Amino acid sequence: MNISNSRKLISIFPKQRKVNRPEKQLSQKKNCAQSFKSRVKSIDIYGKKINLSYKGDDSFKTLPGAFSSLIVIFILLAYFAFRSYVLLSKSNPYLSKPTFLRHLLSEGEFKAMDYGFDIAFGINQELDPSIGHYQVNQVRYYYIDKYDANGNQIRIKDRIPLEVQRCGQEHFNYENQREILMYNIDDYQCIVRKNISLEGNFYSSKFSYIEIKLQKCQNSLNSKIVCKNQSQIDDFFEREKFNVALVNSIIDFNDYDQTKKSFIDDSIFWDIESDKYKKSNMYIQKQEANLQDDFLQLGQFEAFSFSQVSNIREYDDQYSALEGTLIALYLRFDYRYDVYN
């Protein structure tokens, strides 16, 4: 290869310049410094954007863009007006009603009539004592400090008779007297003493409930009443119904002035059959409500409790001529309860 050819090759493929190591390290340090400097500058909250202008304006505006903006503004205003109407009229309340269980072994007494409950009962006409009668008792189970031969603690069952009278307009705890007359509740029987108590269940150390019974007349040495013959008694009851009217309650979230409303629940009745013993357990709930109805909410709320009946269990038993009971209704404490929010 001659000298001219070698020069041509050198011009085509020049030798790479060898970078010194100190220069490379200096370049890396410079890049790191610039990166750190840019990160620090990005924190500047007072920095200003550089905007380009179009014909002296800061933005480029068009008619389609203006129409689109008007539509968006109209939608936002309409949504704001709708939500304001909902807020001021309270037409769409947020509701929740979780259900919980009470520990009846330690719950204590529940005086249902102090929370708005009351009950009236009876047949459609006056009951002749020579045919039958009503019997209402407060029944209590409790243990005493005595033990039987097997070492088991003795459990006592007490029956305390409760006075019942014709309801009229003073013994049924309901404000609307017109409804009482309309449903003929004034002719039913009512419990005079309103401080009855419900407590626990059968397995609790204390168990208390109310029993309401309809019984046939039975001749007894302890009674001066002479009963009619059995066929007359059976014929009378076969044509009758045993009616129950109770004061029940609901929560009306659309009424902010009177949220809890009471009403007469007359949906419970039994066709009397002279050869059947019909029983029913009526479970009374102690409900709770927490209301937050103020426009400006700072954690305040209104809390109250009320009674409600929604669980009734019916069953039939074999009629016993020795006892003579046709209908038995037991008022018990419901271990379930709801919290209205």
Image: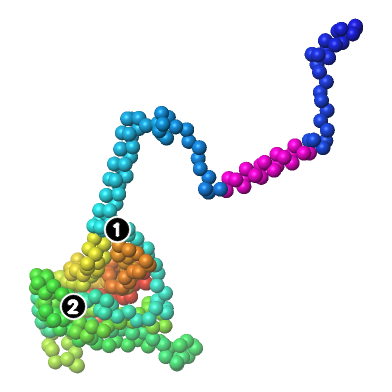
Q: Which of marks 2 and 1 is nearer the N terminus?
A: 1
Give the amino acid type for the residue marked by disc 1 in the picture. Answer: Pro
The one of 207 and 27 positioned closer to us in this rendering: 27
- Whether residue 36 appears in magenta in the rendering, the answer is yes
Say which residue appears at 80% left-offset and 16% top-offset. 13
Q: Quadrant of the C terminus?
A: bottom left
Q: Which of marks 2 and 1 is in front?
A: 1
Please tell me in which quadrant of the rendered image residue 38 appears: top right
Circle 2: element type: loop
Estimate the x, y position of residue 203 in percent, counting from the top left.
Answer: 41, 78
Q: Is residue 243 left or right of residue 2?
A: left
Residue 163, percent from left and from top: 20, 86
**Dominant secondary structure of the residues highlighted in magenta in the image:** helix
Give the labeled residue for mark 1: 93
Q: Where is residue 250 in the image (x, y as percent from the top left)?
A: 25, 66
**Does the image show residue 316?**
no
Which residue is pictured at 19% across the width and 93% down the height? 222
Q: In this view, does 273 lie above or below 37?
A: below
Instruction: Please say if 56 is above or below 256.
Output: above
Query: Residue 336 or 72: which is nearer the viewer?
Result: 72
